[in-house]
Amino acid sequence: MVFEPEAVPTGHDEFLEWYSRQTKWNEDHGYDDPAIASPHLQAWFKDMAQSFPPMNRPISLDDRPRDDGSSTDYAIGRDFIFASFSYSKSEAAYMTVARLAEKHQLGLFNASSTGEEVWLPAGGRMALAHDKEPPTIAGRIKSFLNFD
């Protein structure tokens, strides 16, 4: 997921709550129109679609082959674009997403990562803003015993 950095909360738990709300798909529009997204997101999408074309109408590029694994499912919101890639293209896709997020000064959340890393633009580059902290031994015991 790429997103407008100003649209998200700064803390990790708050970010995950924001992410959860966005992926309930409750905005008052369809999620297949890049025109509803911010200018930075639109520019990212235009660049991204060159290598990873949208698979679904009305934004699909009909002249692209559909069997090479590069077709991508996009969900487009006002402040984010969520992209789902073929497993066979996941590494190339992630590198392209990250490079273009940096280029267009967007935030990046790898929703498939167990570390829940959130990256934000800083000084023309991407910087890790926050992630899921590994639990301490005390935290693991507390969780196991269901203590709060």
Image (cartoon, grey):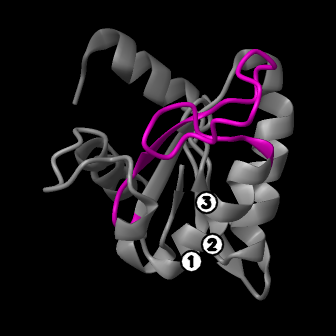
Marks 3/1: CA distance? 9 Å
Mark 1 to mark 2: distance in Å? Answer: 5 Å
SS class, disc 3:
helix
Find numbered disc 2 in the image and state the secondary structure of the residue it sits on. Answer: helix
At 82% from the left and 61% from the top, the residue drawn is 99
Q: Residues within 10 Å of mark 3 (few under 14, many from 20)?
A: many
Q: Is 36 within the magenta?
A: no
* Residue type, label 3: Phe
The image quarter containing residue 134 is top right
Residue drawn at the location 60% of the way across and 28% of the way down: 114
Q: Secondary structure at mark 1?
A: helix
Please name the residue that numbered disc 3 is placed on. Answer: 45
Spot occupied by residue 84 in the image (x, y as percentages of width and height): 57, 31
User: What's the magenta region?
Assistant: 51-79
The answer to whether 78 appears left or right of 122 in the picture is: left
In the rendered structure, which amino acid carries the disc numbered 2?
A: Ala
Residue tagged 1: 40
Work out which residue is located at the far front of the displayed protein and give it: 63
Q: Are marks 1 and 2 in contact (CB under 8 Å)?
A: yes
Residues 85 and 95: in front is 85
Depth check, front residue: 141 or 77: 77
Q: Residue at x 50, y 46 (%)?
A: 59
Label 2 crowd bin: few (<14), some (14–19), many (20+), radius 10 Å = some
* Residue 85 picture quarter: top right
Dot 1, crowdedness within 10 Å: few (<14), some or many (≥20)?
Answer: some
What residue does disc 2 label? 43
